[in-house]
Amino acid sequence: MRAGEIGELTAFVAIAEEGGFRRAAVRLNLTPSTLSHSLRSLEQRLGVRLINRTTRTVSLTAAGHALLRQVAPAFASIETAIETLNAFRDHPAGTVRISVPRAVAVRVLAPKFRAFSDLYPDVVLEIEAENGFVDIIRQGYDAGIRLGESLERDMIAVRVTSDLRTAVVASPDYFDRFPPPETPRDLHRHRCIGYRQTTQGGLYRWEFDQDGRAFNVAVDGPLILGDPDLMISAALDGVGVAYCIEQHIQEHLDSGRLLRVLEAWCLPYPGFFLYYPGRRQMPAALRVLVDFLRVSSG
């Protein structure tokens, strides 16, 4: 088989598995137009249409499904064979693409960039910092980081932070103007800073616990944001009450720039986990990242 034919099949498999030209282009580090040209060449050479495409979607034809069933396992075997060569290298090599919330990228990963790159100079980390839920398989990531309570069951998960705790806070100036709430039900009388995840749509309902019974409260106020750090900034400026991760605002609590309320209703919960699919052999580059970030529970 000629190199060009292998390239055409590689393009077809990527488009089929990623469900689109754009994501396939990111996966292969090519342009969507290059992939489109490769797919047309493959279809012309085989004499059948493999993928139906519109301006918004792509879908496999019956011939496309049949071809994918035959060639996808072969390409997976080739990837596995190449990955085994990492065992013969002095250092693991390769690119690891991960999707993480912005706050995790800043507070958990960024302080470790230098140490990781010094230990593994041949591993390239490609990090997409975005708030909201991401389908890491569909979008071509090797792994993601997410709160433990929201992990999918078929994923392998490794803890990368200790347990977390939420905190309801506002500035001293705000509480000079508005009496602090005594229970979560009092929040309806306050100017609360709302949080909307980009992929979820609805406003986040603040979660609390009372005597082992979990409940949530819908809040409203003058500001809705999609980034936790912006919520902290707004609270520091006296805009209103914010619902934050305690560890992310500890310095402001220690300095007195933020005051905490409703602490008895905010219990610890599992922190962030790095997760990845376990269907294939684990690449060496991902393995060293997992071991590097792994922390004990607690």
Image (cartoon, grey):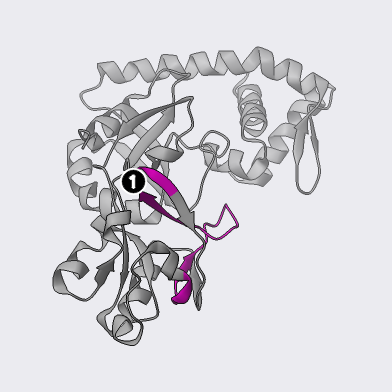
Q: Quadrant of the N terminus?
A: top right
Q: Is residue 148 magenta?
A: no
Residue that mark 1 sits on: 211
Q: Is residue 174 left or right of residue 73?
A: left
Residue 207 in view in this figure: yes
The residue range painted magenta reads: 188-214
Residue type of the residue flagged with mark 1: Asp
Q: Residue at position x 76%, y 23% from top?
A: 64
Q: Nearer the viewer, residue 229 or 179?
A: 179
Q: Is residue 74 left or right of residue 150?
A: right
Q: Residue at position x 75%, y 42% from top?
A: 57
Which residue is the extreme one toward the front? 211
Q: Residue at position x 42%, y 14% from top?
A: 81
- Judge whether 265 appears above or below 50 on screen: below
Which residue is the extreme one toward the bottom? 177
Give percent across and percent down for residue 113: 24, 48
Give percent across and percent down for residue 261: 29, 67
Give percent across and percent down for residue 142: 44, 34
Residue 1 in view in this figure: no
Q: Residue at position x 68%, y 15% from top?
A: 69
Q: Nearer the viewer, residue 36 or 185?
A: 185
Give percent across and percent down for residue 244: 34, 61
Q: Is residue 138 left or right of residue 8?
A: left
Q: Secondary structure at mark 1?
A: loop
Q: Nearer the viewer, residue 197 or 32?
A: 197
What is the quadrant of residue 60 in the picture?
Answer: top right
Q: Quadrant of the C terminus?
A: top left
- Judge whether 171 appears above or below 113 on screen: below
- Judge whether 112 appears above or below 121 on screen: below
Q: Is residue 49 left or right of residue 113?
A: right
